[in-house]
Amino acid sequence: MPKCENNRVELPSRTLCQATRGPCAIVERERGWPDFLRCTPDHFPEGCPNEVQNIKFNSSGQCEAPLVRTDNPKSWYEDVEGCGIQCQNPLFTEAEHQDMHSYIAAFGAVTGLCTLFTLATFVADWRNSNRYPAVILFYVNACFFVGSIGWLAQFMDGARREIVCRADGTMRLGEPTSNETLSCVIIFVIVYYALMAGVVWFVVLTYAWHTSFKALGTTYQPLSGKTSYFHLLTWSLPFVLTVAILAVAQVDGDSVSGICFVGYKNYRYRVMTLFSIKSNHPGLLSEKAASKINETMLRLGIFGFLAFGFVLITFSCHFYDFFNQAEWERSFRDYVLCQANVTIGLPTKKPIPDCEIKNRPSLLVEKINLFAMFGTGIAMSTWVWTKATLLIWRRTWCRLTGQSDDEPKRIKKSKMIAKAFSKRRELLQNPGQELSFSMHTVSHDGPVAGLAFDLNEPSADVSSAWAQHVTKMVARRGAILPQDVSVTPVATPVPPEEKANLWLVEAEISPELEKRLGRRKKRRKRKKEGAWTLVSNPFCPDPIAPAPMAWAQGRRQGLGPIHSRTNLMEAELMDADSDF
C-alpha cells in the first residue's frame, strides 16, 4: 500500500479514506483528524475505482486496555467500533476490588445472620408475635435477609464473573439482553425487589406506629381490616418498579460490588407522637405501659438517629457520584486516548507518555455507601435484642427438649373473668368449683415487647387467692344468676306475661351517694279514711315466689343484697381470641 505499478502510484480513493476513519471516530471528536486522514479531494479523488477495497488486511490487531475486542455492537465503547470496556471496572485497581469483596462478604454475612436470628425469633413465638405493628418488623427483616442472600451469591465458585460479565469479556450494560444468561437479571430481582419491599414495609411501619400511638387509651383498633391493604401495597409496588426497570433495560453490572443493580432506597421516620402522649396524657396509661413507652421512646430515638444517619450517608454518596461522574468519564476517555497514542508512538520512536486515570471515585465512599445499606438491615434486627427474646428462646428450648418451664405464667384478668362468666351454669350448681386455665390462655411478650401497649395487659403479680375467688367476685357483680332471673333497668318496659317470672334485685345506695345525687326521702302520705284499698282475693291467692338458691340465702342472711350494674351480655365479655 499504496499500489505501485509501471512507476505509477495509485492513491486510495476517497471512499476508502472514509471507510478507514469509521472505527476511529473518537480521534475526530477528541483531537481532530490529522492531515493524512482528512480525505480532501486533492489527495483522495472521487469516482476512482477502488480495487484494493477487497484486500484482506491483517486482522490480528487488538484493542488497547482497558478496552477488549468484541463483535457485539451493544458492547462497543462510544466512538470506538469493535472495542468495549473490560468487565473489571478500570476505575479501580485489582487490590481495591479484592478489598471491596472482603468488605461485602463481612457485612453481608453479619446482616444475613442478624436478620435470620430475628426471623427465627418471630417464628419461635409466632402466636404472640403475629400482632401489628410489631409483625411488620418481621417482614422488613425478611426482605433484608433475602437481599443479603443476593449480595452473597457472588461468592459462589465463578458466580461473580457470570453475574457481572458478558461472554465476550465486557461489562454487562443495559440488561436484560437476548443473547446473555439470566444470572444478572436474577440477582437484580432478588436484591432490588427485596430492598424496595423492605423500604415500603418501613413506610407502612411508620404509619402503623403513628396510628397505634394515637389510639392509645381507647378501645379503637386503627389497624383492624387494613393489613390486607398493607400486603397489597408492599408486594405490588416493588413488583411494578422491577418490571418497569427490566422493560427499559436499565440494569447494569458492577465488578466492584459484584451484583447487578439500578437504584437505592429512601426511609422516612416519625416518633413525635410518643412524646405527645407521654407529656399531654400522663395518667392515661397504666404504670407498666408508661414504663414501656419510656423504653420504646429511647429505642425509637436511637433507631431514628441511625435511620437518619443512614439516609444522610446514602444521599451524600449519591450527590458525590452525581457531581463527579462527568469528570470521571472525561478522565477515563483521556486514558483511553493516551493508551492509543502509546501504540502509535512505538513504531515512530517518539516519547511514550505515562497514562493514568487522574480522577476516579474513592473506594472509601463506596464502602460507606454499602455500610449504610447493610447497617439498615442490622438496625432492623436490633428490635428483637430484648429480654423477651431470651425468654422466647428459653421456652422454645424447653419445649424442644421436653423440660419443664418454671417461668411465671401471665394471664389477663379480663380473660379469667370472661371464663368464669362462660362457666356460670356449672358454677351455679357448684359455687366452690375452681377454674383451670390452659396454656392457650397464657400470654407472653413477643420479641418486640416494647411495641405492645395493651392497657389490659397480663400481669405476673396476680395472686393465687385472687384467681381462686374470681368466681365469687363475678357472682358478687351479678354475672352469675339463675336462668329464670333477669336484671332489668328501671326504665326498660317489661311485657306483662314476663312480670310473674321476674325477681326484684335491690341495690343499696349509701347516704353519701344519695346526698351527692340530690335525692331526698319523701314522707309517706297518710291514707285517708274511707279510701279504697286493694286486698288479695282469697279465691285467687298470690303466686308463691320460688325458693331462693343456696348462694342467694347465704347472701340474704349475712352478706347483703346482690348488686348489679346493667344487663351483662355474654358476647361482650367473651374474647374472640381466647381459647376456653
Image: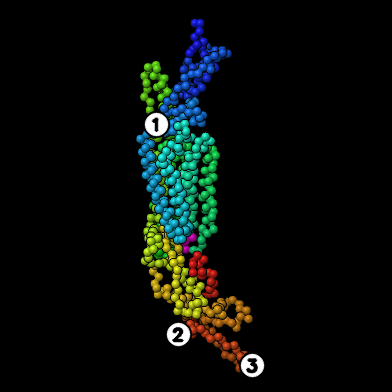
Number of labelled discs? 3
Crowd around label 3: few <14 · some 14–19 · many ≥20 (10 Å) = few
Q: Which residues are magenta?
A: 213-217
Give me the residue at 37% from left, 21% from top: 352
Q: Taking the image as drawn, is residue 112 in sight?
A: yes
Dot 2 or dot 3: first in sequence order is 3
Under tag 1, what secondary structure? loop
Q: Is residue 429 depicted above or below 4 in this figure? A: below
Q: Position of residue 218 (x, y in %)?
A: 49, 63
Alpha-carbon span between mark 1 and mark 2? 97 Å
Q: Amino acid at mark 2?
A: Gly
Q: Amino acid at mark 3?
A: Phe
Residue 539 shows which numbered tag?
3
Name the residue rendered at 40%, 45% in the picture: 108
Mark 1 or 2 closer to N-term? 1
Q: For residue 173: magenta?
A: no
Residue holding disc 1: 359
Instruction: Find disc 2 in the rendering and name its residue.
Output: 558
